[in-house]
Every structure is written in structure tokens, then in C-alpha cells.
Image: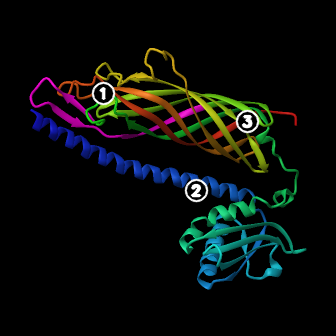
Amino acid sequence: MPIIYGRLIKIKEYTKIKVMRQINKKTICVLVLLFCSFSAIYAANSKNITLNIQGTGQPAFVQGFKEALVIEANAAGYEITDNIGAAKYSIRFSVEFDQEAQRSKFNVSLVKIADSSVIVSMEYLFADEEEMLLYSQLVFFMLMANLPDNETAASEPVNDNWRNKWLYISPYYNYSLMFLELQGKGLVGGIGIYNDSVTPPLIAPLDNKIIPMMGVGLGIELQFLDFMSIEPGAQISIEEILLNNRMLNVLFTAKLKFPLKFIRSVVFAPYAAAAYPLRLAFDSDSKEVFANYGTPIEAISFPVFFGGGVQIAVKAGNDGALFFDVNLIYFNESGLKNPYYDLYPKPETIYYKHFDLSFAIGYKFGIGNRKR
């Protein structure tokens, strides 16, 4: 019996490997969506602006970074020209070796051609070309975020009411990763469930878990101050913590947001979040896999869990915005009922530290203009 059961565990581990491959594919999709969101941010500030990009210093570094900046500028919708007289702004950078720091120094500036004024200048140290190129998108975004507001103004007055609404309704698609970090409480050697009713005792090792979850959600955000809003909401996803034991997870949330409106077409909103999960079985054969929440068990009958995140919203239409959201919620120590109880009955409850990392993309509809 133990040999057959061991083979079943190996089959389950193989199934986990297949699931992890699926996780990797879905994570790539999420990163693509994030890249598209940043591309939209760039495009919002790129109307009718021609750039010239110049570099000096170590030839290999100069050529590589110039090509990277050109790619970012083209993707953002800027026009690129080698004729400095035809450009409105110039990105100028230099790369040289810093003897004192024993690293290469990268200086980059955004210059207005008409009067040669430097709008913003930044300096970085890096070890090699790969490290420098890794941050090319971030560097480009930080440069262009400092363009004057009138550069993105259209011929008619700019409508930025989209970020000053009383109410936002925000449907979204969500992809989450549940991280369960195994705790040693009651386990043999801190990792094993066991059966001591036989001789010799049977022991089976456990490990940490990563469970992917996909779902949809809806938030209703009230912006009661220019710099503060509150958003209650609910998120529905399907989770499978144990093989063939699928549950419907309804996560109720409340977010206290702090909108930052220093870029006309973008709002960055860091926030603190409180959450409460409700799990529902699909059928009578499914069972609640979490035994409890919180430590100690008796002290927390109706726990509320906390975390935080950031939302990046980009104007899309006169009254709404496309947004990308990422957050992390910590669920304290959660007890999972022993799924192998028939052969390894001790302990009855296996404890994990529980984190959820969530990515979301959606659209927020604004209702009712606020007076500013």
C-alpha cells in the first residue's frame, strides 16, 4: 500500500510540473499586458513631437543604448530624426568609465533644442552593457515624463475630467498566484506528515505550494478628496489547492487609494488594502480545504487580512481609463486540512504562511465631475 501511495504522490508531482509550465505561459501573457499598458502611457504624451538622440563615449555602449532608446521612442509614437535642426527635443547621453567607482557611468539629459535648456538630467552607474540596457525603458519613461504639459495639449482645451470623477466603476480581469509557505508546526523534522501507529512509522515529506488562480472582479471607487479615494469591491476566481478539489474563491476587498496626478494622461495610485475570502464548494463532493485562518485559531473568528499595491491608470476616452493593478495580500498563518489523512493521519492540520500576488487589467468608467 505505501509503495502504491508513493507512486500516486509522484503522479501528483508530475501534474504540478505541468501546472507550473502553464503558470509560466500565463505569467508571460500578464507581462505582455503590462508592457502594453506602459506603451499606452508613452503614446499619451507623444503627439507631434520629434526627437533627436545623440551619444558619446565608449562606442559599444553608445551604439547599444542609442538603439534601445530609438526602439522605445518608436514604440511610444515619437518621431526620430538624425537632423538636430528638425527636432524639438534631444536626448543626449554619455558613457565613461569611473575610475573611483570602478564602474561605467551613464549620464543622460533631455534638452529643448530651441534654447538648449536642460529639462532633466540623470546619472547612473552600471557594471556592464546588459545591466544598462535592462533599464532603457525605465530611463526613457522617466525622461519623457518631464515634458512640459503644453507639449501634449491638443488644439482644443484638454479634457482631464476623467481623473476627477466622484465615482468610478471598474470591471477587470485578474490573474493571481497563491504562495503557501510550509510551517513546521506538528510535522516530523518540520517537513513531514506521519503515521506512528505502524512499525516502522510512515513519513511523507511536504513542500511549499504555488497555486495559480484566474478570475474577474468589480470595484466601485469613491473619490471623496483629490488625493484620496476608497474602493470596495469583490473578486471571483477558481482555485485548486488540492488536486481535483476546485473551489470558488470570492475575495471581498476595500482599498484606500492615494492618486498621484503629476502626469496629465496618467494616474499612479498606491493603496492599502483589506480583504476577506469566502470559499464555496462547486458540489457536495468538494470540501473546504482550509481548516482555519489566523493564530491562534480561537482568537480570530472573522479575520480581515491586509496588504497593498499600486494601480496605473491611462486615459482612454473622455470619462475613463485603462488600468493595470498589482497587489500583495498577506493572510497570516492558514491551516490546511491534511489531504493524506487516510495513510498519514498526523497532524490533522498542516500550517502555511499564505500570500496572494495578484495582477489585474481592466477599464474604469467615471461618473460625475468633481469641482477642483
Quadrant for the N terminus, please. top left
Residue 118: x %, y % from top left: 84, 70
Magenta highlight range = 192-218
The extreme right residue here reads: 115
Residue 315: x %, y % from top left: 72, 47
**Residue in the picture at 77% in, 46% down:** 261
Examine the structure image and report whether residue 287 is included in the region drawn in magenta.
Answer: no
Judging by the rendered image, the residue that carries numbered circle 3 is: 366
| Model colouring | rainbow
Q: Report the Cα–Cα distance between label 1 and label 2.
A: 45 Å
Q: Report the Cα–Cα distance between label 1 and label 3.
A: 52 Å
**Residue in the picture at 44% in, 23% down:** 293
Residue 279: x %, y % from top left: 43, 24
* Mark in front: 1 vs 2: 1
Examine the structure image and report whether residue 208 is included in the region drawn in magenta.
Answer: yes
Give whichever of discs 1 and 3 has the lower sequence position. Answer: 1
